[in-house]
Image: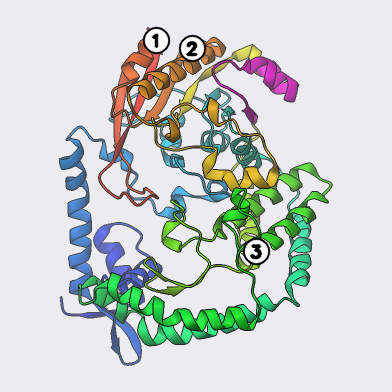
Amino acid sequence: MNDLLNIKQASKWASDYTGKNITISNITYLIQYGIIQKINSNGSTQVLQKELKDYYNRYLSSRENYFKKQLGEDLNWALSFDKYKEAETTKHVHRLHPYKGKFIPQLVEYFLDNHTDKFKTETYFKKGDIVLDPFSGSGTTMVQACELGINAIGIDISTFNSLIANCKIAKYDIDSLQKELDSITQALENFIKDSNVVVFEERLLMELSKFNNQYFPVPEYKHRLHNKEINEKEYGNEKEKQFLPIYQKLVSQYNIKLKQDKEDTFLDRWYLANIRNEIDFVFNEIKKIQNNNIKKITSIVLSRTIRSCRATTHADLATLLNPITSTYYCKKHGKICKPLFSILKWWKTYAKDTISRLQQFDKLRTNTFQLCLTGDSRNINIFEEIEKRNKEFGNLLKKQKIKGIFSSPPYVGLIDYHEQHAYAYDLFGFDRKDELEIGPLFKGQKLNAQQSYIQGISDVINNCKGFLVDDYDIFLVANDKYSLYPTIAENAGMKIVNQFKRPVLNRTEKDKGAYSESIFHLKKQ
């Protein structure tokens, strides 16, 4: 147990021990974040097998027990999909753009595919069927249906959500898309090459590197944090103040303008002046693209880019507390970090990533119909709207109708779905329909908000069931902590015939406590 393992050996040992694919990157992460100690031996990085074993014992044995202790023994651990790595739960086009509140594709696939097990004892959908998601979000149900040979319709009140979803399932001339992305990249590089910002940022990075190497050495600093040898808040604040004069001197030396002249919109407030100039430049280049499909997917690349370039700390990307215009101690990375002064790096990264993800999905997609409608699921005429956009799909829809629904409705008072993409609404000029959201954060979670939510979800199901086959199956994913879904089912003339309770392991927000959601199976009463 005191054996020393190099990184490759540690990866193999941990994979064999846990039965999961533990990569070299996983082991490196544990070292970098001080979870296990780095030992230098004969010029190579090594770790103690005992430390690895202790870590994975804690991780594996406690996780399921902890969740069940907190949430109940009726928790269906098989639906945790804990064997999947993040790269698999965000595979191909599922990560074309960030989106709060989406479910993982494996959950959709579990209920849509034709397998059975001791929990799912029958199949509900087959190839050629049509499935509906009336709360489409970023289009996860449509994408997985396309993989499985199932036709799908999405509906969302948000114009931007519909854009994301339709971009995921659209077909592209990859060569033409690559040329447009390359052209914009070149234009952006020319736009900024003579800017003071380029030289300023090079100098700033050099100074940060020297400072961080001295005061936040990797991995020693994080290992000391992990062992509680350092008061992170006090030490971080002290070093943040120590570096600030260096930063301010460079800002003055290179005449860097930090804030924009106004703060009227999200784009005005949350982006440094140079970032905003580059955003506007790229957007104007995108407007010149002739092919509409390519123009849309390129807009998604820009939106993903500018989301990563907001003037906030790395730890506050999801919450956006206050705009950041200076260097700061970063809790996420354990060192002094800086705001971004150019979008170029992220633009190039996401342009390359988008091409790769579209190519991956092209190999998996089937020749089926997929379309997301922008509209209110409480009153939209699905047949009419589909026929307007695709007559062939409209004829199929009228002929065989929709087999069922798989959807994750919004939760009560949890997310403002328009506000999470406020930057995109500002940039693209889309109309916001916040007042039509069901259960938004701004309405809260009190009794009147719950009653409004019940009415909204009930209205959606009642409208949509008119387009379904008689023997439909409806699956709704929800964290029903207020027990609203029995009433919703009754209002829709349905019964809950089964309920699958699953742990949610990989949450993106700061609350990492035990959390579950239920998949309600509804049928005609």
Please state the extent of the stretch shown in magenta in the rendering: 369-396
Instruction: Judge whether residue 174 can be spotted in this image.
Output: yes
Estimate how packed mark 2 is, as few (under 14), some (14 to 19) or many (20 or more) residues with alpha carbons within 10 Å.
many
Q: Amino acid at mark 1?
A: Asn
Q: Which residue is mark 3?
A: 273
Amino acid marked by disc 2: Asn
Local crowd at mark 3 within 10 Å, few (<14), some, or many (≥20)? some
| Secondary element type, mark 3 | helix
Magenta-drawn stretch contains 384: yes
User: Which colour scheme appears in the figure?
Assistant: rainbow
- Which of 55 and 15 lies nearest the eye of the viewer? 55
The C terminus - image quarter:
top left
Closer to the eye: label 2 or 3: 3
Q: Are marks 1 and 2 in contact (CB under 8 Å)?
A: yes
Q: Position of residue 69 (x, y in %)?
A: 15, 41
Cα–Cα gap, marks 1 and 2: 8 Å
| Left or right side of 364 for 7 | left
Quick check: 484 above or below 73?
A: above
- On screen, 157 above or below 174? above
**Horizontal and vertical percent for residue 217?**
36, 83
Residue in the picture at 28% in, 69% down: 13
User: Rounded to the nearest whole Å, what is the CA distance between mark 3 and mark 1?
Assistant: 52 Å
Q: Which residue is mark 2?
A: 462
x%, y% of residue 17? 24, 62
Amino acid beneath label 3 = Ala
Give the SS element for disc 1. Answer: helix
| Residue 217 seen in the current view | no
- Give the mark, 2 or 3, whose residue is nearer the N terminus: 3
Q: Which residue is mark 1?
A: 491
> Which element is circle 2 on?
helix
